[in-house]
Image (tube, helix red, strand yellow):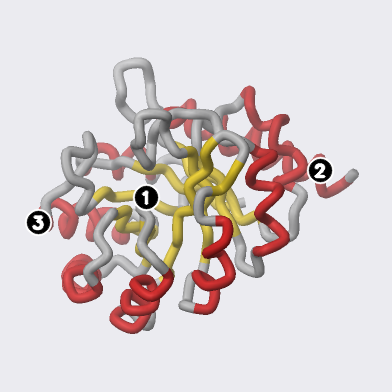
Amino acid sequence: MLLKVCGATTQQDIAVLARTPAQWAGLWYGVAQGRADLDRSRLVTLAAAARTSGLSPVIVTLLSDPHRLAETVNESGASHVQLHGFLPPRQLALVREALPDATLVKVLHVAPGRVLEHTWIPAYQDCGTDVFLFDSFGADGRVGSTGTPLDGAAVTAALDSLDRPFLLAGGLSTPSRGEYRHLLGHHGFLGIDIDTAARHDDGRFDTVRITRTASTWREERERVRVT
């Protein structure tokens, strides 16, 4: 099971993640007024630190300009790009063309009862999406790291349209893992993405919480696979 931890902003954050089971480190870029948004220089520095620490840096962005994204990927050396927002499939195709070697992670935003881009899923796949990430759409319209619990039933209803692996995000925690057992057993399940659950009460990344979350979700998945 893959573990992505999102919202690193300092070299200390990267050092903490390197001591946990995390494999992907989410770095915000182009998320206007986002609490963890980085400028280009900081992104490049933290992406290099992540790679040195054995982590894969993931650019988490609302940008859809293929040329700007290509420049950012080339400068940072990041090989993973997570696309938030409601860009149409034709725009994703342009991003794919500009980033032929990157792993493109397209976020699917989940509101209560439905996946907002459900009808676009086949087109996203045809346009070059490598991995999907189901994440909660905040009641205030925010996307990403909202802490809002993910609607598992809405995700399940969209799975018949998927032929790519997927990650789960959105208020995931150690206690909530049992609510998503049916998704953990799906053949396309790749892993989880956490932010709030990765942090101590003071807002800093916590090795104990990250490690506990990873181990309990992996144990739950193994139980599902055995049964």
Q: Residues within 10 Å of mark 2 (few under 14, many from 20)?
A: some
- Report if the CB atoms under discs 1 and 3 are less than 8 Å apart: no
Three-letter amino acid code at disc 2? Val
Give the numbered dot on residue 153: none
- Report if the CB atoms under discs 2 and 1 are less than 8 Å apart: no
Q: Is residue 160 rendered to the left or right of residue 62?
A: right
Residue where numbered disc 2 is placed:
224
The answer to which of 97 and 91 lies nearer the viewer is 91
| Mark sitting earlier along the chain (1/3) | 1
The answer to which of 43 and 16 lies nearer the viewer is 43
Q: Secondary structure at mark 2?
A: helix
Residue 163 drawn at (x, y percent) = 66, 69
Residue where numbered disc 3 is placed:
41
Gap between marks 1 and 3, in whole Å?
17 Å
Residue where numbered disc 1 is placed:
25
Q: Is residue 150 rendered to the left or right of residue 204?
A: right
Three-letter amino acid code at disc 1? Ala
